Image: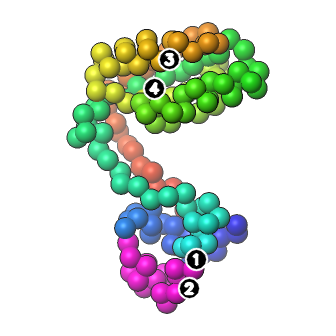
Amino acid sequence: MPLDMIDNKILRLLQEDGRMTVQALAEQVGLSHSPCLRRVRQLEESGVIRGYVAVVEQKQVGLPVSVFISIKLERQREEDLDRFAAAIAPWPEVLECYLMTGTRDYLLRAVCADLAAYERFLKEKLTRLDGIASIESSFALAQVKYTNVLPIR
């Protein structure tokens, strides 16, 4: 879907405040209510807007530990890659998973309550997957920057 300047402005505003009313959004982009709503619906239906969420502070809900996990598979065949991706998809601890270039095949970001919880995750889930050659965990000491706002111009 080609995006124009108004679509981009709608996206910037909704990324900053997903609870913004259509009326307030319309006023800020210079449209009346109906055309603005039509554009938002079109952005949603085309998949440009995937959904709306509340951004939750992980420490406040008892998940202060962030772990970045590098995974190397024994083989990089398509079926092995797909099997790994399907296996980790339902795990709530894994917030992000990327297929990577370089020496590792996957990079995961997981959250947990403490080191014992991560050890359980590692032993009860990750190490039980077939086809993993190595697992390397790195613990974040502090979060310096986090945003989910894309730099749309």
Q: Is residue 83 something that shows in the picture?
A: yes
Q: Nearer the viewer, mark 1 or mark 3?
A: 3
Q: Amino acid at mark 1?
A: Arg
Prevalent SS, magenta region? helix
Q: Residue at x 55, y 33 (%)?
A: 89
User: Label for residue 39?
Assistant: 1
Q: Nearer the viewer, mark 2 or mark 4?
A: 2
Q: Residue at x 38, y 72 (%)?
A: 20
Q: Which residue is mark 3?
A: 126
Report, in whole angstroms, how far the alpha carbon at label 4 lies from the one at label 3.
13 Å
Q: Nearer the viewer, mark 3 or mark 2?
A: 3
Report, in whole angstroms, how far the alpha carbon at label 4 lies from the one at label 1.
38 Å
Along the line of sight, the residue nearer the viewer: 66 or 33: 33
Is 92 a magenta residue? no
Dot 4, how many residues are within 10 Å of its Cα: few (below 14), some (14-19), or many (20+)? some
Query: Where is residue 139 shown, x and y percent of the image?
Result: 38, 22
Dot 1, how many residues are within 10 Å of its Cα: few (below 14), some (14-19), or many (20+)? some
The reply to whether the C-beta atoms of the residues labelled 1 and 2 are less than 8 Å apart is: yes
Q: Quadrant of residue 60?
A: top left
Q: Residue at x 52, y 81 (%)?
A: 36
Mark found first going from the N terminus, 1 or 3: 1
Q: Quadrant of residue 120?
A: top left
Range of magenta residues: 20-39
